[in-house]
Image (cartoon, rainbow, N blue to C red):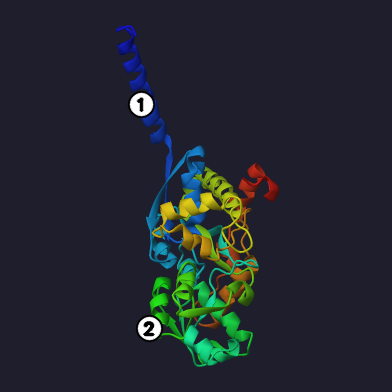
Amino acid sequence: MSKKLFPALAALALAATALGAQAADELTVLRVGITSASSDVVFFIADKKGYFKHEGLAVKFTPFDSAAKMVAPLGAGQLDIGGGSASAGLYNAVLRGIDIKIVADKGSTPPGYGFQPLLVRKDLVESGRYKSLKDLKGMKIAGSAPGSASTSTLNEALKSVKLDPDDVKRVFMAFPQHVMALQNKAVDAALTTEPSATRAVQSGAAVRVMGDDVIYPNHQLAVVFYAGAFIKSDPESAKRFMRAYLRAARDYNAGLKDGKIAGPNAPEVISILTEYTSIKDPAVYRAITPQGISPDGKVHEASLKNDLQYFKDEGLVKGKVSVEQVLDHSFVDAALKDLGPYQPAAAK
C-alpha cells in the first residue's frame, strides 16, 4: 500500500468516527421507568433489536421498586415513559392535577396466560384446609400493595364465592418476599407475579391453585404510561416510541405458545430477558407462565373501569375521576396506521 494513502485513510476514519458521534448525538433520549421485571420485556426487545434507534430514539432505563414510585417523576417531567399497574395511586395523582396517560398494554391475562396466580401453602392443600376458593376465609393472603391491581384480582376471587375482603387478612409486601413468607408460613396464600410464583412452587412451599386468567380473565395488570409533559413537548417522539414498542410486542408474541415462552421466537425472547434482568437462568423463563401483551397495544378498558370502581368502593380513590381521563388511544392508533394490524403468520 502506498504511503500516500495512509493520511487519506486516516482522514476518512476520523470523518466516519465524527459522523457516527454526530448521529448518536442526534438521537432523542427518552427516560423510561421500569420495574426490572419480565413484564418490561417489550421495552427490552425494542432496545436490544434496535427498534428505538431505528426511530431516532435512545432510551435510558431507570429502575423503580414499583410503578407507584414512578408517578411523581412522571408528573414532574423527570420521566417521559413508565410501565406498571394502573393503581389507585395513579387516579389519586390525576385528581391532584398530575398529567399522566395510559397509552398501551404492558401485561394482561388472556386465557392461558395467568402470570399472577393464586398460590396456597402446600401443607394447607395437603391437609385439606384448602379445597376451594371459599376456604380462603380467615386466611392471611399476601399482595403487593393497597390499591394495586392485585387487590382487585383478590376481590374478584372472593366475590365469586360470596366472600369480601374483610373475610381475609391482607398482608402487603414486595412480590419476591412472598416466596419466603410462604416458606416461613408467615402467610397462608399469595397473589404473586412471575417469576416469584414459579419459584415458590418449585421450592415446595406452595401450590398454584388458580391462574388469574381464570379468576379475572383479560385483567389489565400493567400498562405503559406517558407523562403529559412528554406528550405536549414531543408528540412525534411519542409516536415513534410506540411504533418501536409495537414492533417489539409482535416479536414477543411470536415467542409465546400454549401459555409458555415456547414459540418460534422463544430463544431470542429468553436471551434478551436474561441479559436485561437479574435472573440469568434461561430455565426460569422457560418454566414461568408469561403475561399476555397485545401485539396491537390495545388495553382492556372494561378491566380498568372495573378496577377503578373497586378502588372507589374501598375508599382508596375519592373524587370524580374516570378511566377516560387517563386513557389515550391516539399513539397506538397512529402506530397501527403505519404498521397495520398484527398478522401472526407474518411474525418473525
Q: Is residue 2 left or right of residue 99?
A: left
The residue type indicated by label 2 comes to Asn
Q: Residue 3 location, x and y as percent?
A: 29, 7
Q: Quadrant of the C terminus?
A: top right
The residue type indicated by label 1 comes to Thr
The circle on residue 77 is none
Which residue is label 1 attached to?
17
Res. 306 image quadrant: bottom right
Which residue is label 2 attached to?
184
**Mark 2 or 1, which is nearer the eye?**
2
Residue drawn 53% across the image and 71% down it: 116
Q: Residue 71 location, x and y as percent?
A: 43, 63
The image shows residue 221, relative to residue 315, as above or below, that is: above
The image shows residue 261, relative to residue 302, as above or below, that is: above
Q: Is any atom of residue 100 visible in this view?
A: no
Q: Residue 134 location, x and y as percent?
A: 59, 90
Res. 280 image quadrant: bottom left
Number of marks drawn: 2
Q: Is any atom of residue 301 visible in this view?
A: yes
Asked which secondary structure carries label 2, the reply is loop
Q: What's the CA distance linking mark 2 and mark 1?
A: 57 Å
Q: Nearer the viewer, residue 73 or 43?
A: 43
